[in-house]
Each structure stands twice: as C-alpha cells, then as structure tokens.
C-alpha cells in the first residue's frame, strides 16, 4: 500500500475554518445551486433507510444533513462556525428536529465512538491534511455493517467548470500549479489513491461510480455577468484578483465574460463536470 502523505498544509484559500468558509457562506446559494445535482445523486445512491443515525462530514449549510428525512437522525459536522450557524438557522426555520450540527473537525476522533450506521459527505472529505488518519477516525465512528458514501471531484481536466476557467484566469494572474494529492477540491481525483486511503483506514467493499453531466456554473439561470462575478469573488484566487489594478481586473472580467458567453444556454451557464460517487463498507 502507498501511504505517502500529501503536504500537511494546503493553500491558505482552503482554510475552511476561516476565509474559505466565509467565502462559501457569502455565496452559499450559488455554490449549492451548482452542486445540487451531484448532492441528489449522492443521496439517491446512499439509499438511507428508516432509523439510521447518519454523520454528515463537511455539511456546509446543512442541505444533505436535512435530506436524511424524518425517519432517521443526522449530525452535521463542519469546521466553519459561520456555516454551522447557517445550518442550524435553516433547520430551525424549516422545523427539522431530527438533525443537529456541531462545529468540529471531522478529521479528529469524534467523542461518540461507533454510533453511526452511515457516514455521508458531499465534497467535504477532500481537505484533510492527513487523510489516512482522518478516514481511520471516520471508520471508527461507524458501527459494524455500516457504510460510507462520498462525492468527490474527478480530475480537473474532466471538470471544465474549473479547469477552463482557470486557463482563462492564468492569462491574467500568476496562479500556483496544484500539487497532486494536496488538500483541496481535487485531492481525490485519482480513484486508486482514494481506494488506498480507504483500505488502509479499514474500509472494505469499496466501489466507485462516475457521475458526469453539465452543471449550472454560478447556479441555475445565471447570466454571464453573474458567472464572472462569482468566479472573481467566490474562487480560491479571489485575493489575487483583489490585488489587480482596475484596468487589469477589467481585462480579466472581459475575458471571463467572453468565455462564459460560449457556455450560455437558456438555463444558464452550463459546463461539464465529473464526480466520483464512492461507497465503502465497515
């Protein structure tokens, strides 16, 4: 088995307890609208049943946590205080009483022990600094016979919503090249690597299913101007954009606008995406 660890630190933009969590919160409806189809596919494949206790890792605004339904119960974990506050507010407003939320690092051993029948995560598991240890701890929260269900992004080249946008931005901003397997959105783009992480952590019967479709960048119905604004303010290169002169920013905005014009449809800006839906047993 290859247990080579990725770097223990990620780009500061991936600080979900701080800036990245705040950025997601500021654009929460946009982000969630974009990834909603993949979240729905994850929950369909998870096929949760009555009476199960579910742990939602990296729960964000609590959409997947609350999707558990009235016959089960769920605990949502997220490292961002702002996102946990929003999730609690949403659950209270919706009158959903079978869920709770905790601001905590899911990579750390949880105090409950093995009390969950199921663990789910919609794009919340790719940011662990030490993934082998983190998934070992998650394994220990699941009862024997339980299961893990993840959605993780496939390779950037298969996610043009990201890679094509970054190519445009690189003509105007010097962006660092991502390090393979480093914490970030595409940490688990290689199924063999994720399989090794899960097997080493004690999981078995690991299965991958590819999900591919066009996603609505900047959310359903977004106009090109909406997509440009979302790209400039919602992505990890936001600070570099802020450092541009007004003229440089205008040039970048114009280039992105022309790019998104080519992706415009009556339903908004639609771009190819691919994710892995991953299941593993305990």
Image (tube, helix red, strand yellow):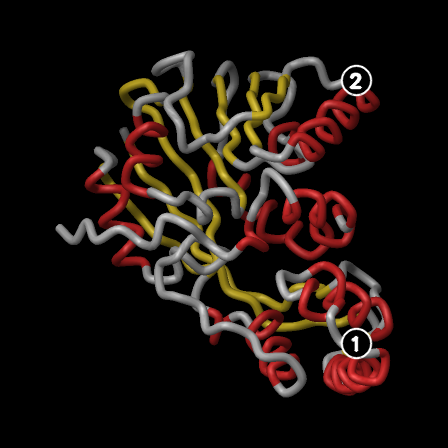
Q: Secondary structure at mark 2?
A: loop
Residue 11 versus residue 126: which sits nearer the camera? Answer: 11
Q: Which percent across, then down, holds residue 218?
A: 75, 62
User: Is residue 174 left or right of 6 when viewed as pictured?
Assistant: right
Farthest residue to the left: give it: 1
- How many numbered markers are drawn? 2
Question: Dot 2: within a 10 Å radius of its alpha carbon, few (fewer than 14), some, or many (20 or more) residues?
Answer: few
Q: Is residue 67 above or below residue 260?
A: above
Spatial CA distance of label 2 from label 1 is 36 Å
Residue 185 versus residue 72: which sits nearer the camera? Answer: 185
Q: Is residue 73 above or below residue 246?
A: above
Question: Hey, which quadrant is residue 112 in on the image?
Answer: top left
Q: Residue at x 65, y 83 (%)?
A: 168
- Residue beneath disc 2: 95
Residue 53 versus residue 84: which sits nearer the camera? Answer: 84
- Residue beneath disc 1: 265
User: Is residue 173 left or right of 30 when viewed as pictured?
Assistant: left
Q: Is residue 259 above or below residue 48?
A: below
Question: Dot 1: within a 10 Å radius of its alpha carbon, few (fewer than 14), some, or many (20 or more) residues?
Answer: some
Q: Which percent across, then down, holds residue 107?
A: 41, 33
Q: Which percent across, then down, holds residue 44?
A: 54, 41
Question: Hey, which quadrant is residue 88 in on the image?
Answer: top right
User: Is residue 169 left or right of 200 when viewed as pictured?
Assistant: right
């Amino acid at each position: 088995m290859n247990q080579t660890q990725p770097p223990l630190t990620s780009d500061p933009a991936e600080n979900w307890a701080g800036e990245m969590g705040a950025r997601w919160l500021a654009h929460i409806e946009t982000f969630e609208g974009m990834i909603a189809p993949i979240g729905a596919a994850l929950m369909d494949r998870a096929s949760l049943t009555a009476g199960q206790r579910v742990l939602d890792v990296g729960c964000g605004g609590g959409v997947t946590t609350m999707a558990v339904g009235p016959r089960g119960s769920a605990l949502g974990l997220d490292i961002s205080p702002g996102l946990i506050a929003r999730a609690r507010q949403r659950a209270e407003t919706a009158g959903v009483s079978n869920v709770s939320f905790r601001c905590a690092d899911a990579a750390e051993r949880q105090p409950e022990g093995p009390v969950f029948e199921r663990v789910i995560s919609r794009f919340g598991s790719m940011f662990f600094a030490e993934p082998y240890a983190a998934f070992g701890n998650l394994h220990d929260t699941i009862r024997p016979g339980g299961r893990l269900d993840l959605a993780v992004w496939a390779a950037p080249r298969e996610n043009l919503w990201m890679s094509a946008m970054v190519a445009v931005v690189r003509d105007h901003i010097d962006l660092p090249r991502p390090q393979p397997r480093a914490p970030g959105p595409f940490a688990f783009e290689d199924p063999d690597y994720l399989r090794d992480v899960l097997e080493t952590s004690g999981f078995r019967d690991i299965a991958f299913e590819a999900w591919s479709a066009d996603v609505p960048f900047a959310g359903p119905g977004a106009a090109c101007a909406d997509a440009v604004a979302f790209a400039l303010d919602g992505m990890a290169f936001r600070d570099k954009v802020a450092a541009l002169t007004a003229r440089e920013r205008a040039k970048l905005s114009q280039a992105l606008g022309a790019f998104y014009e080519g992706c415009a449809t009556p339903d908004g800006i639609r771009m190819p995406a691919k994710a892995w839906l991953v299941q593993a047993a305990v």
